[in-house]
Image (cartoon, rainbow, N blue to C red):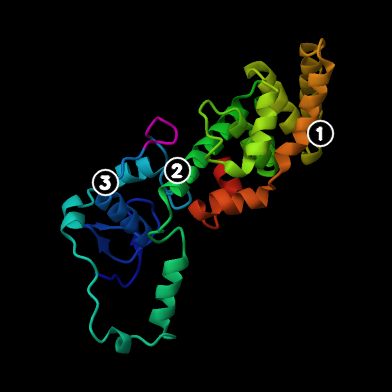
Amino acid sequence: RTLPAPVPCRVCGDRSYGKHYGVYCCDGCSCFFKRSIRKNVHYTCITGIGRCTIDKARRNWCPYCRLQRCFAVHMNIAAVQEERGPRKPKNSKMLTHPNSPQSIQEKLDVITPTETCPSRSVETYQMYEIAAHIFLTAVKQAKRNSGFGSLSRESQNIILGHLWAPLFILRVAYWSEDIEHVFYFLQSTIKHLRYLKLDINALEHFENVLLCRMDLLKDEEQVFLASNLMQYSLDSLALRFNNDSKLFIDILLAMPKLFYPSAPVLYSFLFKPIIGLVPIETIISR
């Protein structure tokens, strides 16, 4: 079953050294398929469309589309159901030295989260799935924002590369479903932001103030445009809450709360277990 040279995984395009369930696929996709079939897991698409891109960088973002891809390349369900558990030779301790290359590789395989069958709880997987959904939605909606969306795509990607974390937290706070219990570590920030009761229009202006950062750009025209967009949104918010200056001040004071936890902390906690070492900027620019 082992190939002398790797071939592309039929599911995600990563390296495959042999067939799993009738198809050349990587260990990660093989493990995902086996776990999904054995546990009869029912996934939902994180975008609700069912056409997410499944590649090495994004294969863990949408389990629904990943499983559909497994079906599309004809991975064998019956082979999973008929498969026995691994057999342990009686003298297994004598077969592999604890410090041999094979043993070390087995240990590495166990602790590599994006390539193995992780034993995480259903709640943890739910948190990852919801986080991915909110993140992708936040980036997509930001690029469609009538203000921020008028910047060049290059400028958008630069800014989002720096400010994806506060944007994510803002979208978590105003998500349509009650997910406060899922992101328990953000409860204080979520409650503070929801207290402001921003409607769609005010939220868009608030997002513009957050994202239209001319200090992150170098192109003079883009710097000028970002500056005007931020000022316009600030003026719009001031006019909107003209009769409630305290609320307007509270809105401005809420901005710093979006930067805690920091981007590296959020990345390590919510996204690194899913996308591994793939820079989140790579996901943003797609």
Q: Earlier in the sequence, mark 1 or mark 3?
A: 3
Relative vertical location of residue 215 with respect to residue 227 in this rendering, above or below: below
- The image quadrant where one finds the C terminus is top right
Q: Is residue 176 magenta?
A: no
Q: Residue sitting at 28 percent across and 65 percent down?
A: 18
Read off the residue under disc 3. 40
Give the residues in magenta.
Answer: 44-50
Q: Nearer the viewer, mark 1 or mark 2?
A: 2
Quadrant of the rendered structure where residue 110 is? bottom left
- Tell me, yes or no, if residue 212 can be seen here: no
Q: Is residue 54 left or right of residue 143?
A: left
Q: CA distance from mark 1 to mark 3?
A: 55 Å
Percent position of residue 182, x then y: 52, 40
Quadrant of the rendered structure where residue 241 is? top right
Q: Label 3 sits on what residue type?
A: Asn
Read off the residue under disc 2. 126
Q: Label 1 sits on what residue type?
A: Glu
- The image quadrant where one finds the N terminus is bottom left
Read off the residue under disc 1. 220
* Mark 3: few/some/many CA within 10 Å (<14, 14-19, 20+): few
